[in-house]
Image (cartoon, rainbow, N blue to C red):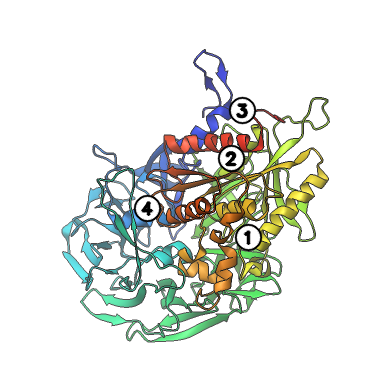
Amino acid sequence: MPSTTAAPDGAPLHGQALFPEQLARTRRFSLGAPQHPAVSPDGARVLFVRTGGGDDPVGRLWLWEDGGERLLAAPHGADGGTGPVPSEERARRERARERSTGIVAYAADRQLRRAVYALGGALWAVDTGGGTPFPVPAAGPVVDPRPSPDGELVAYVTGGALHVTGFGGLGGDRCLAAPEGPSVTYGLTDHVSAESTGRLRGHWWAPDGRALLAARVDTSPVRRRWVCDPARPELPPRPVAYPAAGTPNADVSLHLLSLDGGRTEVVWDRAAFEYVVAADWDAHGPLVTVQSRDQRVLRVLAVDPATGATRVLHEQRDRHWVELVPGAPCRTAPGLLVKAEESAGTRRLRVGYTLTPEGLQVTGVLGTDGEEVLFTGCEDPLEEHVWTMGPKTGCRRVSDGPGVHSATAAGGTVVLDSLAPDGHAVTVLRGGRAVGRIASLTEEPVVTPRPLFPVYGARRLRSALFPPSGYDPGAPDARPLPVLLSPYGGPGMRLVVRARTWWACVAQWFAEQGFAVLVTDGRGTPGRGPAWEKEIRGDQLAPVLEDQIDALRAAVAERPYLDAGRVAIRGWSFGGTLAAAAVLRHPEVFRAAVAGAAPTDQRMYDTHWKERYLGHPEREPENYERSSLLRDAHRLRRPLLLVHGTCDDNVAFAHTLRLSAALLAAGREHTVLPLSGAGHTGGDGKAAGRLLGFELGFLRDALGLGTGGGAGAG
């Protein structure tokens, strides 16, 4: 837990100087955090993955039982489990934002007696009751292995084919479905489903272990992109089937595959409902959720496992789009459908005749435990809590205290994962009472966030304001503070929360360099209901920029020590688009911007995500024009730094290259910083550790602040 270290002359070095390196080394403080907990049906045991510490990137498999932890499996061999993995597994990790190596994921049988995992493409298993991990023969490099509910078999994907094998070679290895061509896979997901709808899986066991429901993905209609690392020209580029807005999607179908060789296709109107956004197979049969291309209709389908025929259990419509709630729909043990509904500005859950309260914004379904439904929701957008709802208990809150909470439950046991203002904790609850903890080994940040949480304007914009530590605006030598906006501002993520997030630590670090850092969640961000989220339909920039400027002006009016003449903005991904748009469209407000991994031409982003907000580009081209940046290149007259990973397969490096070309053609000076070999998250290692310092230097120069630091440095 480093807080200070020694400078070359032996004097202590303040923790602020260590922070950028610490952020990269700990991979945004994700290392050492328990991940992917699963609870046994009797509630007695919890499986989870965790690295060895706050700066150890290698994941291991653990078991919590009777108040104690036991290591089940760790990577082994010369490379420690950090060696090459199949390309499909690399893609899965990128979509899942996995930042560690070694054992990063696992799957277990129904009773959590046996777990399986892939390590360097090899298939491994371990019995949770004791014993050492053992290899399981497989037909090739393994992706997404999953044991049957009884733990006797394991399904996995290799070379795009779905296989089933027995443990220790018992039962032999059977190929249930082999790809008919190089563009076909069985048992895997596709780019859009994983990146934009949250469906990371492609196969599901039947409860009796005699069959599987599997996705067949044919990417032959999808246009290819070629991703390479320009810093390593000896390596060939890799193709990525990327369906950009307005272009064909992958052809996704579902098939029921029995272990005796039978095969039945699941039947629905795939022309009208081409997105398979969720699937499962519970005690009541296969359950599939599909969505129309325009995303205005969502259908929940019950599947007849004998014939593949489907019937509609639920249909939801919306004139803008039907928002996908993670984990929903699903079914309780008695078979009641858990579904999301929108009414009077609230996103609610319905289970039979039971409905969550008005004003509680449901953000996700975590699972079911018997008749109980576990879910997350917001009464205040600054906090996200865990709730449970059932016919006997009604709707009640499980988590307590400020923060962002999540959970997993079974057998009356709840594993509560809490990110609070003072850090991260994982608590095991039974009957609402804490019976133990799973240790979080995350490193303590050397910077402690100290945000204020003002609410600004008629739209009651939730903001977090980070002043420098110890800054006293009334002191005789106090100078006005330059202002740095650091928003995301887009759908799917809110930054203004009462929790010690990594981005709050970054904001405080910039504050300690002499800025007042302002973060605002405006229209389009989650946690405030469907009407708030859908105000960006047709224009993803104008209302969002308006909210950022309104919050800035309200902050300056309330706190005269904020210097409205020296305002900059920084952001990543959608936040990067927002930052670039700010200096292009409002140079009278913003003096400089840092735009990281920014989508600049919205037509280049994927179908499901982009058409949700802007429609189909052939039918509503004006929405893409007003939300893209290339047409604004000639307007630049403020310093702009563009940062982008050269191997980004989500927001292609071409976004930054095209904006840079447009700026150059218009005669507008700007700076481009390519991150060699980095993906969408910006990468790890020494280069990532230097990035914040590079941004800081750029912003200081752009605002005329010189090289000095400290509160109020001017």
Say which of 681 and 422 sits in front. 681
User: Would you call the spot at circle 2 few (<14 residues within 10 Å), some (14-19), or many (20 or more)?
Assistant: many
Determine whether, in the image, residue 211 is placed left or right of residue 312. Answer: left
Identify which residue, 56 or 85, lies in the foreground: 85
Q: Earlier in the sequence, mark 1 or mark 2?
A: 2
> What's the distance in space between the residues labelled 4 and 1, CA to CA?
29 Å
> x, y percentage for residue 550?
75, 55
- In front of the other: label 4 or label 1? 1
Could you give the CA–CA distance between mark 3 and mark 1, rounded to whole angstroms?
35 Å
Instruction: List x then y, in percent, for residue 22.
Output: 50, 34
Q: Which mark is residue 506?
A: 2
**Kind of residue indicated by mark 4:** Ala
Query: Which residue carries the number 1 mark?
Result: 525
> Tag 1: residue type?
Thr
Which residue, given by chain and number where applicable, does mark 3 sit on? Answer: 707
Q: Quadrant of residue 714?
A: top right
> Badge 4: how crowded within 10 Å, few (<14), some, or many (20+)?
many
Amino acid type shown at disc 2: Val
Residue drawn at (24%, 45%) of the image: 234
Q: Nearer the viewer, mark 2 or mark 4?
A: 2
Q: Viewed as shown, does residue 676 lie left or right of 152?
A: right
Q: Residue at x 48, y 34 (%)?
A: 690
Secondary structure beneath dot 3 equals loop
Query: Which label's residue is closer to the chain start, 3 or 1?
Result: 1
Q: Is residue 35 above or below residue 1?
A: below
Element type at mark 4:
loop
Q: Which amino acid does the dot numbered 3 rest on?
A: Thr
* Residue 400 image position (x, y, % from top left): 65, 51
